[in-house]
Each structure stands twice: as C-alpha cells, then as structure tokens.
Image (cartoon, helix red, strand yellow):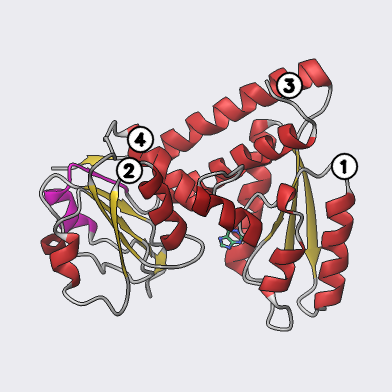
Amino acid sequence: MAKIIDGKQVSANVKEQVRQETEALFQKYGKKPGLAVVIVGNDPASRVYVNNKKKACETVGFQSFEYALPEDTSQEELLELVETLNADKNVNGILVQLPVPKQIDDKAIINAISAEKDVDAFHPENVGRIMIGEYAFLPCTPAGVMELIDSTGTEISGKRCVVIGRSNIVGKPMAMLLLHRSGTVTICHSRTQNLAEITREADILVAAVGKANFVTGDMIKEGAVVIDVGMNRLENGKLCGDVNFAEAEQKASYITPVPGGVGPMTIAMLMKNTLTAFKAQNQITD
Ligand code: GUN
C-alpha cells in the first residue's frame, strides 16, 4: 500500500521557510516583497485561485496588490496595466491569472511582463533559461512536483521518469526538470502508442493529462512514485485527479492525493519565486 505524499504539509513547510526569510530580510533592509495579481472577468475558478494567492501572501508576509478588471477589458488596457506594474518598484512579481477573455491574446500579455517579474516563468526568456538550466524561476507546478518527489527521499538520477502530458505550463518543463536531475525521461501524450507499456516502466510517473481516472492500476509499476497533477471536476462537483487513486495506491510506493497533493504546492512555489524576484531586484545576495 502506497504512502500518501502530504502536499498540504510540504507546502506549509515551503511557506514557513519563505516567511522566515522574508521576516529576516525585512529586519535587515526594511523592505518586503510585493506580488501583483491581475484577474480579468468573473471566472469562478480563477476567483478562488486569486483569493488563495492573496491569502498565501498574507501568510508569508508579502504585500499583495490585486487588480480585478471587467470582462470586457481590451488588450491595450491590460497591456497598459502590465507596463505600469513593470515600472512599479513595490511590485516584484506580476501574475496575470489565465485564462483571459477571448478578446485578449494571452501570449501578448505574457511577452509584455518584464522577465524579472515573471513569477509564473511563462515568458519566453524564462522558458529558454529553463532549457539551458540557467534559471531564476521555475514554473510553479513542476517546481512543486519536484519538491514533492524530494520529500519522499527518492533518488531521481538514473531513474525511468514518465510524464503524461506535453503542455507548456506543466508537461514540457516537468520533463526538463527531471532531466536536469539526471532522470531518463519520456514524454507521453494523446498520440502516444502503447501508452501502458511505457508507463509500466516508470519509477516516477507524473500525470498531467486533464482526464479523470485516466491512469489505471495496470499502468503503474510496482513501487513507483506517482504524482497526480490533474484537477478534474466531476459532474457531482467532486474534484478528481488524472490517476485512479484506489487502484494506484495498491501498486505505488508513494502517491499524491487530489485534492491535497500538487495543488497546494503551486501557490507555495509562487511565494518562493516572488521572494527570489524581490532579492534579485534589490541586489540582495544573502
Ligand atoms: N491559471 C491556472 N493556473 C495558473 C497559473 O499557474 N498561473 C497563471 N497565471 N494562471 C493560471
């Protein structure tokens, strides 16, 4: 029977480290990190995420600035706000909650955010830095997954790692982070043939597919570490991962639950990135 990886506990540890460092830096320099969160429109899921980000800022002692713009905001108006935030010395990190309404091109917005303030690590400059292993920020979800794997004490070097999903936000950077730690990495996706044969070889299996219960017990190697990035809302309103948990926990050595696994890590890593941005912008090296 698998051990459960407690994402709430690991994320609380990360946030506590950030809180302590923030407090020490405030004592020394009299300044604290600031995160601007921009939400456009009324998507209820986005509203929940943004509220959680604000709450996390309070927990770790950051300033947070929220900009809630109406659904019919134009691309020019949003770009203007991004430019203002780029120039604001009190703002160290800028996050525009995605998705944005359809009249706005999200790529144009991501490109406009100053790379030094891009705490999502979505800007092409930051994406490129990840590729060559010289990064300031890691995208929050894959970085959180690495923390969860590390919390189990599992050695990644030399292991077979399989990532299901090839999104720019999770699958691709996830594969790169595992590769940087000398994993032998395979990326699978919707066109992959003989998927179960590949996943059954995985010592570390990361599922980021977006389909409820997609990974079944027969796809998992005995003793694998299974990380479930999925957040699927079922018809009955329940939240469900990409992994069939009841089956997977019979095979895995460690497994993340949904909710309470990867989800809480994403926000903790956003706090870590914002602290990193604050230090870099203030030339703080301690
Ligand atoms: N929407 C869902 N997840 C994210 C995220 O990590 N960052 C941003 N900016 N928007 C999101």
Whether disc 3's CB lies below 8 Å from ligand 1 is answered no
Q: Is residue 4 visible?
A: yes
Residue at image mark 4: 150
Residue drawn at (46%, 56%) of the image: 173
Lower sequence index among marks 2 and 4: 4
- Mark 3: which secondary structure? helix
Tell me whether the residue at label 1 lies in contact with that at label 3, contact meaning CB atoms closer than 8 angstroms. Answer: no
In this rendering, position of residue 141 left or right of residue 136? left
Chain-order first, disc 4 or disc 3: 3
Q: Earlier in the sequence, mark 1 or mark 3?
A: 3
Beta carbon of the mark 1 residue lies under 8 A of ligand 1: no
- Residue with the mark numbered 2: 182
Q: CA distance from mark 4 to mark 3?
A: 27 Å
Mark 2 and mark 4: span between their CA atoms?
14 Å
Q: Which residue is mark 1?
A: 89
Within-10-Å neighbours for mark 2: few <14, some 14–19, many 20+: some
> Where in the figure is residue 8, as x and y percent of width and height?
44, 39
Q: Quadrant of the C terminus?
A: top right
Can you name the residue that lies furthest to the front here? 132
Mark 2 element type: loop
Secondary structure at numbered mark 1? loop
Provide the residue designation for mark 3: 25
- Answer with mark 3 or mark 2, whichever residue precedes in sequence: 3
Which quadrant of the structure image shows residue 49?
A: bottom right
The image position of residue 163, as x and y in percent, is 32, 59
**Bounds of the magenta span?**
245-256
Amino acid carrying mark 2 in the image: Ser
Q: Residue at x 14, y 44 (%)?
A: 223
